[in-house]
Amino acid sequence: MAKAGSEPRLDGSGNPVWLLLELTYQCPLQCVFCSNPRNFADYRKDELSTAEWIDVMSQARALGALQIGFSGGEPTLRKDLETLVAEADRMGYYTNLITSGIGLTEARLRALKEAGLRHIQLGFQSTDPGVAKQLAGVDVWQRKRDMARLIKAMDFPMVLNVPITRQNIAQVPEIITFAAELGIEYLELANVQYYNWALLNREQLMPTRAELQRAEAQVREARQRLGDQLTIFFVIPDYYEGRPKACMNGWGAIHLTIAPNGDALPCSQAANFSHLTFPNVRQQPLEKIWHGSSVFDLYRGDAWMPEPCRSCDEKEKDFGGCRCQALLLTGSGGNTDPACSKSPHHHLIRQAVELAQHPTADGQLIPRHATSQGVNIETAS
Amino acid sequence: MKDISIRTQDIYEIRPPFMFRWEESQQAHVLLYPEGIVKLNETGGQILDLCDGQTSVETLIEKLAVKYCASDRTAVRNGILNFLEVSHGKGWIRTKA
């Protein structure tokens, strides 16, 4: 079975294939692993209008984009979501909604179905209400569970996406049972990737090696038991792999994110490059942004690569890993992703992993919260 | 998906959540599904195009054999049956009830 969340088996021949619209960074949850920019509140006044979003979708479709994701923040906070989905469907996109489920109602689900929505990815924290609250910052466990049931009752294909952390990794068997009983097609147990709020909380969130191995064994057992009924993806963290992830299939290769204010980004984490000025769809046509902007060219292809990437026989496989992770951990986006064991900065990853093997019980989790300055943390060394 | 052998009287259709269509920008048929894309080669695209909920496998073989002026019917037949089996295994198609 093809993997949900996997890379498409085609390239865009130099054009974007995936369009991710971050409609708003507003969200009723305060997840401790939120991947939104830490200055998310600054975007609120600048959100694109309905007409502007439709124009972006139309321009990206003309460039060849096939998949569209409506994300956030919480995209259902936008009252025009149904309108945007209907337009996207009409244009020929495969429409995906990435939601916490909070903000959805039966009436809105019905309207989204009528608008042509094809698939819903529901974020879920835990089958344990206490853990769910600890991770999401607010008590929404029951509403999420009800929403998961409603989504299935309305026959939407659904991916249940559970970001895995030290707090919920012990509940993996219960989460699998929950998904199977609900009749969900895909369960994605994705170890949290450490950006923004997750990076801030990394020391408290990262599971131990033993916990990961136990969860992996539980997933293997469940796959055998459940067969075709439920497809389970278990995405282990790149911190433990020694190999970097093929992030975005390479910078500026097939993926295009549009931030709530119209900034065009090669990936949703790219705003971490705070010294760059990102091209904005309010000011330039998308085609010019994609093909003619220095930002999208910055790490495109392999000319930018330093050693050990440059002479590495895996460079066409992983594209040097994640530019944002290189920036956040080494101080330069042009370095090899430190998740790679060949990186001269790999000790930063090893140190973080080592630290995670001896968790302290008294650590505080910092929930996502509004701050216009973001939160400064020391990452480079 | 369980292995099956394709019966030629059966009629196949695209199985939700997959969406199958021609994509101009790729000059190819594509299968779209939650967060994924498969680009089909020419013959794969033509076979799936006839998994339309109306055409039996027998007719599908006949149509494509004529289209390609195939002299070796057995080879065409086996190629199509094999592709349908793989497609079924990947969950792209299902028999029409």
Image (cartoon, coloured by chain):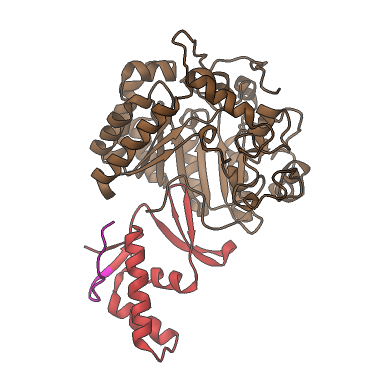
Chain colours: A brown, B red
**In the rendered image, is residue A270 in sight?**
no
Residue B48 vertical position relative to residue A346 in the rendered view, above or below: below
Q: Nearer the viewer, residue A25 or B70?
A: B70
Q: Nearer the viewer, residue A67 or A226?
A: A226
Q: Residue at x 69, y 34 (%)?
A: A344
**In the rendered image, is residue A360 in sight?**
yes
Q: How many marks?
A: 0
Residue B93 vertical position relative to residue A32 in the rendered view, above or below: below
Queried whether the magenta region covers residue A200, the answer comes back as: no
Q: Main secondary structure of the magenta part?
A: loop
Q: Residue at x 29, y 75 (%)?
A: B57
- The residue lying furthest to the bottom in this view is B71
Would residue A76 be found to the left or right of residue A377 on screen? left
Quarter of the picture containing the C terminus of chain A is: top right
Residue A187 position by quadrant: top left
In the image, residue A195 lies at what x, y percent?
Answer: 58, 27
In the image, residue A53 lies at what x, y percent?
Answer: 59, 40
In the image, residue A256 lies at what x, y percent?
Answer: 62, 44
In the image, residue B52 lies at what x, y percent?
Answer: 34, 68
Q: Nearer the viewer, residue B65 or A93?
A: B65
Residue B94 position by quadrant: bottom left
Residue B5 vertical position relative to residue B59 in the rendered view, above or below: above
Q: Residue at x 57, y 19 (%)?
A: A200
| Span of residues in magenta | B1-11
